[in-house]
Image: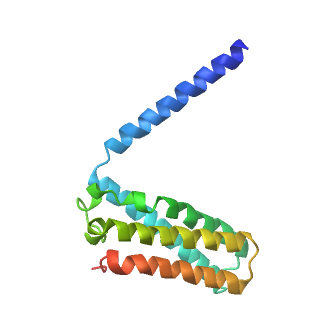
């Protein structure tokens, strides 16, 4: 019983330390660092989208990797809105338009559409959907990306 109690205390202290460390780190985030992080998240999504497209076009034969790519996108979709804190509207070069923070509710709606479409793609793939179903779900995901990029992302220079 003493060992069990000591383990419980150690786990509680570790969790509290981790939580405190996360809070301190997020309070210290600089706008330029937030922008770099956001860009890394978005590049990750783009990389997985490109990988799925290559597999679906038959350019790459790793069909068994579809689930990993789709689930990675779904994971990034969960944090999509979080990587746009108001403090990251400026501070480094970014293609994020000010309209994101000016029309936050619309932006959140677009982020939710991305979350829904990415979860659906992962579900279709993990459920053994045929190529037509996967293609349709992938197309819907692409539309959700464009639905946010058009109003909220500036063109590349």
Image spot of residue 72 (x, y percent): 58, 63
Q: Quadrant of the C terminus?
A: bottom left
For the view shown, which residue lies furthest in the left direction?
91
Residue 151 in sight in this render: yes
Q: Quadrant of the N terminus?
A: top right
Judge whether 3 appears above or below 95 on screen: above
Image spot of residue 49 (x, y percent): 54, 75
| Residue at 53%, 25% in the rendered image | 13
Of residue 44 and residue 88, the one placed in the foreground of this image is 88
Of residue 157 and residue 141, the one placed in the foreground of this image is 141
| Residue at 58%, 75% in the rendered image | 51
Q: Residue 146 occupies which quadrant of the picture?
A: bottom left
Q: Residue 70 occupies which quadrant of the picture?
A: bottom right
Residue 5 is left or right of residue 115, and the answer is right
| Residue at 67%, 72% in the rendered image | 66
Of residue 147 and residue 90, the one placed in the foreground of this image is 147
Residue 121 is left or right of residue 147, and the answer is right
For the view shown, which residue lies furthest in the front direction?
105
Residue 6 is left or right of residue 89, and the answer is right
Image spot of residue 8 (x, y percent): 63, 23
Residue 97 in sight in this render: no
């Amino acid at each position: 019983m003493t060992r069990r109690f000591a383990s419980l205390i150690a786990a509680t202290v570790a969790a509290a330390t981790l939580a405190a460390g996360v809070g301190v780190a997020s309070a210290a985030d600089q706008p330029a660092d937030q922008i770099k992080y956001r860009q890394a998240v978005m590049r990750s999504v783009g990389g997985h989208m490109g990988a799925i497209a290559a597999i679906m076009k038959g350019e790459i034969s790793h069909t068994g990797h579809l689930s990993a790519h789709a689930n990675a996108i779904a994971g990034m979709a969960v944090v999509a809105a979080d990587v746009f804190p108001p403090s990251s509207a400026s501070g480094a070069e970014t293609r994020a338009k000010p309209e994101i923070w000016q029309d936050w509710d619309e932006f959140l709606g677009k982020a939710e559409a991305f979350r829904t479409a990415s979860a659906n793609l992962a579900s279709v793939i993990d459920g053994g959907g045929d190529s037509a179903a996967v293609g349709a779900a992938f197309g819907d995901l692409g539309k959700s990306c464009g639905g946010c990029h058009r109003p909220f992302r500036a063109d590349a220079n």
